[in-house]
Image (tube, rainbow, N blue to C red):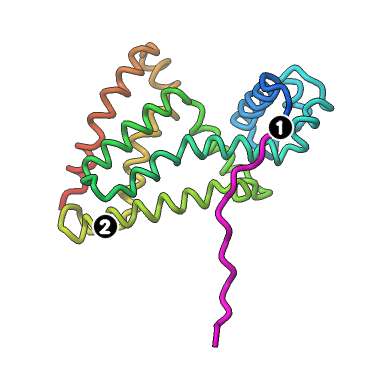
Amino acid sequence: MATEGKPKKAPAKKPRAPKDKDQSTEERIKEAARKLFTQKGFAATRTRDIAEEAGINLALLNYYFRNKEKLFNIIMWENMQLFLGVILQNMENKNMTMEEMLSFVADAYINMLLKNPDLPFFVLSNIANDPSGEINNSGFMDRLSSLRNTFFARFGEAAQKGEFKDVHPLHLMANLMGMIIFPFLGKRLLTFRFGLSEEEFVQLMEERKKMIPGWMMRMSAA
């Protein structure tokens, strides 16, 4: 006799963007919303604020995006693809050694963050200020869980082979993400207080891409 179980959760789908509308206006609205969501978080940002930042009236914003939630979900999905998409796909590649995987993750993330330096602020500020659960609605947390599970599985395999210490893989994940993301969160401190120019900061990050895999391997060696 068939047993009843919990219904499977449908995979997150990309929110639909407006069709047949001026692309430049749409992008201007999204850029304004991205800026304000980063600075203030979802809850504290009003649609009127977004319209003013984009230089349009509220009616036009509502024509392109029916409400703040839909606009946020579209932006969050785009950021999710930047933040997780390529990483998750390549982390599942069993042909990569652990050091090759760490090198790929460091290289891909730092390249992406150099092009999108405000992305960590956007993600972290909206996770911290998400009383209505819009982060969950966007599908971001589902993708983050997939990344965590894949990461844990790879490190579990390496620990069984004696390549890594048998510790909770969350320690390793936190170390890796901290090494990659913190310099961008602390960029103002590094550039203003320590006198780094933009070019010197980029050079520091280029060097860091090569150093992180070695640090991780030495730190986690059995």
Task: Left or right? Give the position of 148 relative to 122.
Answer: left
Q: Quadrant of residue 182?
A: top left
Percent x, y for residue 42? Answer: 66, 38
Q: Nearer the viewer, mark 2 or mark 1?
A: 1
Looking at this rendering, what residue extends furthest in the bottom direction?
Answer: 1
Q: Label 2 is placed on what type of residue?
A: Val
Residue range in magenta is: 1-18
Percent x, y for residue 1? Answer: 54, 88
Magenta stretch holds residue 14: yes
Magenta stretch holds residue 134: no
Give whichever of 177, 51 is nearer the camera.
51
What is the CA distance from the residue labelled 2 to the residue labelled 1? 49 Å
Task: Left or right? Give the position of 3 relative to 96.
Answer: right
Give whichever of 73, 168 is nearer the camera.
73
Percent x, y for residue 126? Answer: 59, 39
**Circle 1 residue:** 19
Name which residue lies at 61% across and 29% down. Answer: 34
**Circle 2 residue:** 167
Image vertical order of residue 30 relative to residue 170, above or below: above
Task: Please rate how many residues cluster around mark 2, counting C-alpha atoms within 10 Å: few if below 14, some from 14 to 19, many from 20.
Answer: few
Name which residue lies at 21% across and 48% down. Answer: 220
